[in-house]
Amino acid sequence: MSAAEPTLADDRGTAARRDSAPISRRPSSRLLRSELRLIAGRRRNQMGLLVLAAVPVLIAVAVRISSPRQGRGPDFVSSITSNGLFVPLAALSVELGLFLPLAIAMLAGDAVAGEANLGTLRYLLTVPVGRTRLLVTKYASLVIGALWGVAVVVLAGAAAGVALFGTGPMLTLSGTEISFGSAVWRVVLVGLYVAVGLAALAAVGLFISTLTEQPLAATVALMIFTILSWIADSVPQISWLHPWLLVDQWMAFGDLLRDPPFWDNIAQGLRVDLAYAVVFGLLAWARFAGKDITS
Amino acid sequence: MSFFSDHPRSRWVLPVAAVGVIGATALTVNQAASADSGLPARTAAQLLADVRSANVSSLSGTVVQTSDLGLPDLPGIGGSGALGSASSSLTSLVSGTHTWRIWLDGPTRQRLALIGANGESDVIHNGSDIWLWSSADKTAVHHRQDTTGARAGSTGTKLPSGVPGALPSGAPRTPDEAAAAALALMGKDTSVTTSGTASIAGRSAYELVLTPKDRSTLVGAVRIAIDSQEHVPLRVQVYSTKLTNPAFEVGFTAVDFATPDVRQFAFTPPAGTTVTESDRPTAPKGGAGTNPAPGEPSAPSLPTMPGAPKVTGSGWSTVVVAPFTLPKPTSGSGTAAGSAAQLTGLLKALPTASGTWGSGHVLQGTLFSVVLTDDGRVAVGAVPADLLYAALATK
């Protein structure tokens, strides 16, 4: 942001007035920045980030106090003591089941349904940007929110882990050891992979959010979608359905911790993520662009 | 844009079209592209000669094995369940879907990694060292062998002959191994034909079809896909007469015939690992050393079988009847006792049957059947249970 630019108002009304200057062709990030400012400013989102950050710290402290029993649970947890970077990995595998999708569900519920509920969506639509661009901006802010949430988990976990367990070499699932430097890159890749999955979930959430004017209904509906997906993914009798489920390959990030990394499942996961993002993004667009804004 | 403004409902066409495109793409990619690929036709005999003369000493790739043998679902035996810790164990090969990565570099260096949901088991053969690594319990078992390489060269194949003895399972593990075993079974009992070409792991391949002439066997057909350039079997499918999909399938999903990086074969036990030194090159968890042929998967190797087995029938419908006693659950220690107890529980859960031959428990799989009689005999064959009853009746 350059110094010459006026500071953005937090209030949608003034933001709309400022934007009603003659339309310039140059794409402006002002709408996105205003959106991100709204997301970051909400007290419930700040509390949510605190919860996300608390889990890895909790895991690290608990493991520090009492060593985990060998051979139980995900293989990450028993490796924490050798390298602090396993803390963010263990935290991600724990939070991916509920907390991270819940964070996306909260943001997605607020994105369209929340604005409609507050009556601010009307004002937002008076801004001379098309509905399509408004929706794209909303989705971009959700994607950034997903990255944000994952980054908080990873950074809090890495900080707590390195502080308590140090920076030893990382033991891969293949039984080899890699240096701390390349381990950092593996963890960054894991974070990006998880964030892509959450971004695809955000597209589903955005579509649901355009269907209702109750943000709580949108949030609950997306959580039901997520949990039903997890349940369906764990029933072996319907294994033909599993490759089509969004969450099916979410936990495949462990494949990045093999030596050499195993890409097949990661690629399959990214394909599914992309398919969900495209289909539900288009559904959200079809719904939102033709929707009557009544409140 | 104006079109969509005039016809708001037409917007819904786009997401529907996206679903259609994605679905169609996924289905066509999953279908084996069996259209003609411009390969010259080859007879079955030529293909067999190609396979014998294949000279591939190094490759790396990913192998996926699926089996639907009709075995009862049991916790701990299941394959790709959500509880991933079990599926990376080397003893869990019996059912479900499994993914392997293999690296081969001549007779002295091989590595095989079984990919589990949250873990991995590796067998690494490098010169005189054989390492077995399990990420689930962070253990490594170390075997030393003579550097003469007698073991590696003994089976005559170039492909992973150093590893099989260490793996406890009756199932063939690589396409090459499975094809060799299937080819050994051929003869007057089998008609061998070719059926065009297939595309496997991005490579074009010929398909060889082995059909038992004997109609009484459960094996419907064995299809072997052979790489058109390297002449290495890329996929083996065993069809049951009971199923439309293959009952057993092992094949490459990715393969590269370049020499793998030497780094893949280096293994140093990481700190904090329990290392067991073993002088005898035997399996760590009570497995059989030898490898039964497909179509004739033998009974689990844990029960002891005193006395000589009796063989009736021939070819694909061979039935083996042998004396049989269950191991005592208290004998042995650790995993062996646990496996014995699990096996006893499994047998108790099987359906019972009785007839002129006596009575006992019956396992009717898709490729083979097993009858365990109450008077201590076991009958095994790649045939329906009726033929086993007949074999048991003729004492």
Image (cartoon, coloured by chain):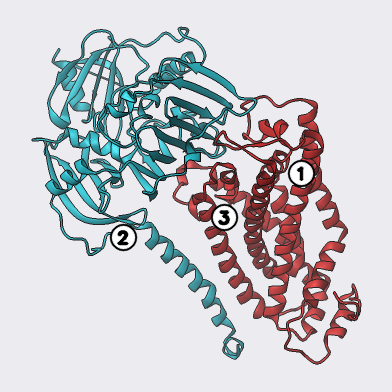
Chain colours: A red, B cyan
Judge if badges 3 and 1 mark residues of a common chain. yes
Q: Which mark is residue A158?
A: 1
Q: Which residue is mark 3?
A: A246
Up-down: is A233 above or below B283? below
Judge if badges 2 and 3 mark residues of a common chain. no
Q: Nearer the viewer, residue B220 or B16?
A: B220
Instruction: Name which of mark 3 and mark 1 comes first in the sequence.
Output: 1
Between circles 2 and 1, the one closer to the viewer is: 1
Q: Residue furthest bottom?
A: A22
Label 1: state its secondary structure.
helix
Q: Which residue is mark 2?
A: B33
Q: Residue at 72% x, 58% y: name it.
A: A147
The image shows residue A207 at horizontal and vertical percentages of 65, 67
Chain to which mark 2 belongs: B
Task: Name the amino acid, label 2.
Answer: Ala
Task: Name the amino acid, label 3.
Answer: Leu
Contact flag, marks 3 and 1 (Cβ < 8 Å): no
